[in-house]
Amino acid sequence: MKPSTLAPSAALIDTLKERVLAGGEITEAEAMQLMGLADATDLAYLQDAAHEITVHFNAREPGLCSLINAKSNLCGEDCGFCSQSVRFDTRVDAYELMPAEEVVRIAKKFENKGAKNFCVVTSGGALSNEEFEKVIEIYRLLKKETTMNLDGSLGFLTPERIRRLKEAGVRRYNDNLQSSREFYPKIVSTHSYDTRLETLRMLQEGNMEICSGGILGMGETPADRVKLALELKPYKPHCLPMNILNPRPGTPLEGVEKPAPQEMLQTIAVFRFIHPNANIKLAGGREVHLSPEEQERALQGGANGLIIGGYLTTHANPVHQDMEMLKRAGYEPGHKTEASSTPAAS
């Protein structure tokens, strides 16, 4: 219920909410005003407004996905948050690309449980030509032997590879920007921010659905978070995963101070004002940084989806607990869960 006499902060939230509901956008300065709210009542009002935007554009069916880690570790990049880089001593499992028959066997297992979507993920900056041909065969077999939607996260692409993935049946591709342009050099040196943006441009030009988001809590500022949201804006991501850094032993970011949960919830709400149509998913690190109650509040304050069943190298909540949480948050999970196999991680 709105206060009978709106405080200036509440009036600001209402003004921006109504503009977004009418199809308009908020500016960077206005987003920073929302990020600057500190009073608990204002933050609750902001989350309620974000949820109103969520339901208006996305109804109450959540977006759910999981990941099959089809190739683990063996990555030559130096992303400071990632335990799959060969540059860091993280002791995670390392294995080459899984055989197509094994991926299909796993896919059928999850299809029989009601899964509708299946995502193949591989570590590394880009697949070799030999690996890419094997992945194409994986998708062809999946297309032939299952009825699921097929997604991928296979590193950097070319227009030709995008075309071939689409021909093989891939509908959506993940390429996270991770942070703002200004902060990015502090966490990665082996490739540029423009390389990631170029991948998004190619996906957009190739008419591939886009999944792209970032990682919060790496030491970035609130301004960096807003800039990340605005960098993503031109690419209109269908899916926008929001990870919270789960510092992995052996990585350069293992000692980063944990962000305050309320700060993360506020960021999610502001992202909703900037991306009203996206499926904003709580992703890696949510179980570490947010209590079940805080995760539920995030689903009532801007988020409308989850990555379930595990991440690339870390585990997640049991799926039945996530389903119960979604129902408590007012969502109707149905049976559109996206399948996973080996645990995946941020």
Image (cartoon, rainbow, N blue to C red):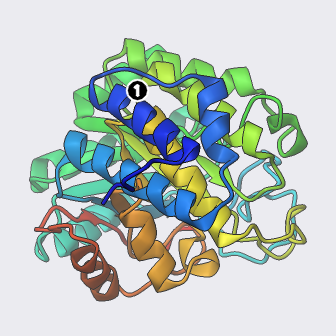
Q: What amino acid type should be assigned to the residue bearing mark 1?
A: Lys
Give percent across and percent down for residue 138.
Answer: 31, 49
For the question of whether residue 146 can be seen, the reply is: yes
At x 63% / y 25%, what residue is drawn? 28
Dot 1: element: loop
At x 54% / y 29%, what residue is drawn? 232
For the question of whether residue 156 can be seen, the reply is: no
Front-most of 318 and 267? 267
Locate the C terminus and report the quarter of the image it occupies: bottom right
At x 54% / y 32%, what residue is drawn? 129
Answer left or right for 285 relative to 324.
right
Give percent across and percent down for residue 321.
Answer: 33, 87
In the orientation shown, which residue stands out farthest toward the top?
Answer: 205
Task: Name the quadrant containing residue 188.
Answer: top right
Answer left or right for 267 relative to 148.
right
The residue beneath circle 1 is 236
Answer left or right for 78 relative to 280.
right
Q: Is 91 above or below relative to 136?
A: below
Give percent across and percent down for residue 215.
Answer: 65, 52
At x 62% / y 61%, what residue is drawn? 264
Q: Residues within 10 Å of mark 1 (few under 14, many from 20)?
A: some
Give percent across and percent down for residue 258.
Answer: 78, 71
Front-most of 264 and 145? 264
Locate the N terminus and report the quarter of the image it occupies: bottom left
Front-most of 77 and 145? 77
Q: Is 94 above or below relative to 159?
A: below
Task: Give the mark count.
Answer: 1
